[in-house]
């Protein structure tokens, strides 16, 4: 079990923890115990994923459960900007129209780290917790396993709330994610995926008609794009063209887990870091960078680089579809571009799903039932479609998928993503992700900040495992 106090210490400690400990240790210089949170990776084909969920309506009329009247509930979330505004609008609409007279007071906490720290602080200090929280599934599972008072399915005040009576047709890749030994602790209301953005028009001009089927083909395409930009008539794009290097934890995890694929099937675990497969994956990334097939730019965002063909690939979330679309429009570019999963070392593909789920915290039975009614309302078709059209999120069900307007500006790039679901790996299925995420970002950052030789990669991975052990 991971201690809440230790988790909070890591969150408050900030980034680059591994760098500090690595330099101190290695002397390098710059040149009731609850069950474990384990779930099962879906193995259906894309067609099966859609068909399995298409037999039921995603939002049938709920059973006749009496909702307590006139309760005021608080809800915390990690969103900011337009998405935070959208969720505030949802709360206002629910407050105006729900027949039980429930009032939702919604509060944004900036981002995942701030939300996590605020929840843990409140719990450890005996301060009031919100009735509901929207958070990444891996956080909810960690909190549940650390005795933070999340109300699970067995504690719901009435039968039928967490089953097909109130929720139906949700894709198994999402619906099964919030189960711990078969018991539901949360509901998957908002799902995103980390992919490779890929400029098809640029690739065709380089001589590639197909997306890369493995890491060797990815390297070939990225390096040819780099060579193209080096030897064209434009000096400003020299040193660009391939993949924009990204030390985000989900990006590195996708490459590392892609290195474990055998016959298209994931080997399963990212940890321990110090494995032959992870070593090979980091060597692959390092070789891309050393050979100028991966590069870092002065600008922290990739959108203009991608729309101006300074990059054939970059890593990003489905949430960035609309942003990238606007940059292509601004450049008056007619290039075709898509999102693709990360290619495996030899075959197969993988991408990471990092969704947000809603859970009920320490509440009375009446508050719990009123909170579940609001969560169920969040699955209404209209609500889910508006989330998608404002964020590029995945549809939670086939019914919602069919309801998205084909004329929506993000539709051409967003539409094929549903076919990738069989290749998705939930971040919440990665053991100790709450600790591994911070350490992995530091490994990725250090990989290109110093004159790291290939033999030092193994030491980085070993130190990563040691730090995970210190916080467990």
Image: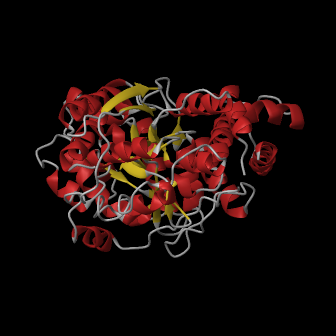
Picture quarter containing residue 451?
Answer: top right
Side of 139 relative to 423 (left or right): right
Percent position of residue 54, x then y: 22, 68
User: 187 or 196: which is nearer to us?
Assistant: 187
User: 231 or 379: which is nearer to us?
Assistant: 379
Percent position of residue 26, x then y: 87, 37
Percent position of residue 444, x then y: 64, 40
Q: Residue at x 50, y 60 (%)?
A: 154
Residue furthest to the left in view is: 407
Q: Is residue 235 visible?
A: no
User: 243 or 81: which is nearer to us?
Assistant: 81
User: 205 or 432: which is nearer to us?
Assistant: 432
Q: Is residue 79 visible?
A: yes
How many marks can you see? 0
Q: Is residue 361 above or below residue 237?
A: below
Side of 84 relative to 344 (left or right): left
- Tell me, what colour scheme is on the image? secondary structure
Percent position of residue 100, x then y: 25, 39
Q: Residue at x 23, y 61 (%)?
A: 398
Q: Residue at x 29, y 43 (%)?
A: 392
Q: Residue at x 46, y 35 (%)?
A: 240
């Amino acid at each position: 079990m991971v201690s809440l106090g230790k988790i909070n210490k890591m969150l408050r400690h900030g980034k680059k923890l591994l760098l500090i400990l690595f330099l101190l240790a290695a002397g390098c210089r710059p040149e009731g115990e609850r069950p474990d949170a384990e779930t099962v990776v879906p193995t259906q084909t894309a067609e099966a994923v859609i068909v399995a969920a298409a037999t039921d309506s995603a939002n049938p009329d709920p059973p006749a459960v009496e909702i307590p009247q006139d309760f005021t509930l608080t809800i915390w979330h990690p969103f900011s900007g337009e998405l935070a505004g959208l969720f505030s609008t949802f709360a206002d609409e629910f407050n105006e129209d729900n027949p039980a007279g429930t009032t939702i007071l919604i509060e944004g906490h900036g981002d995942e780290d701030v939300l996590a720290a605020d929840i843990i602080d409140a719990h450890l200090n005996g301060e009031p917790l919100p009735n509901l929280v929207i958070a990444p599934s891996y956080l909810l599972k960690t909190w549940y396993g650390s005795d933070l008072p999340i109300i699970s399915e067995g504690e719901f005040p009435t039968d039928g709330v967490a089953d097909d009576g109130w929720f139906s047709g949700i894709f198994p890749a999402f619906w099964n994610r919030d189960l711990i030994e078969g018991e539901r602790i949360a509901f998957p209301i908002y799902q995103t995926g980390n992919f490779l953005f890929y400029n098809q028009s640029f690739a065709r001009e380089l001589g590639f008609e197909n997306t890369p089927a493995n890491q060797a083909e990815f390297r070939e395409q990225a390096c040819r794009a780099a060579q193209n930009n080096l030897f064209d008539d434009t000096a400003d794009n020299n040193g660009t063209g391939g993949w924009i290097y990204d030390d985000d934890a989900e990006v590195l995890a996708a490459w590392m887990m892609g290195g474990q694929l055998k016959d298209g099937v994931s080997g399963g675990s990212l940890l321990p870091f110090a494995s032959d497969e992870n070593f090979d994956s980091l060597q692959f990334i390092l070789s891309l960078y050393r050979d100028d097939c991966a590069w870092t730019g002065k600008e922290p965002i990739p959108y203009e680089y991608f729309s101006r063909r300074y990059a054939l690939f970059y890593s990003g979330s489905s949430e960035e579809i609309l942003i990238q679309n606007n940059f292509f429009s601004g450049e008056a570019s007619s290039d075709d571009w898509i999102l693709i999963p990360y290619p495996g070392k030899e075959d197969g593909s993988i991408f990471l799903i990092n969704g947000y789920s809603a859970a009920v915290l320490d509440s009375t039975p009446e508050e719990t039932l009123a909170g579940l009614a609001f969560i169920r309302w969040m699955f209404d078709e209209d609500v889910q479609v508006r989330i998608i059209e404002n964020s590029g999120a995945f549809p939670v069900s086939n019914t919602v998928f069919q309801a998205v307007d084909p004329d929506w500006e993000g539709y051409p790039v967003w539409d094929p993503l549903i076919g990738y679901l069989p290749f998705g790996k939930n971040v919440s299925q990665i053991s100790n992700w709450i600790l591994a995420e911070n350490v992995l970002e530091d490994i990725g950052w250090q990989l290109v900040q110093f004159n790291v030789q290939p033999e030092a990669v193994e030491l980085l991975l070993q130190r990563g495992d040691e730090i995970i052990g210190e916080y467990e």
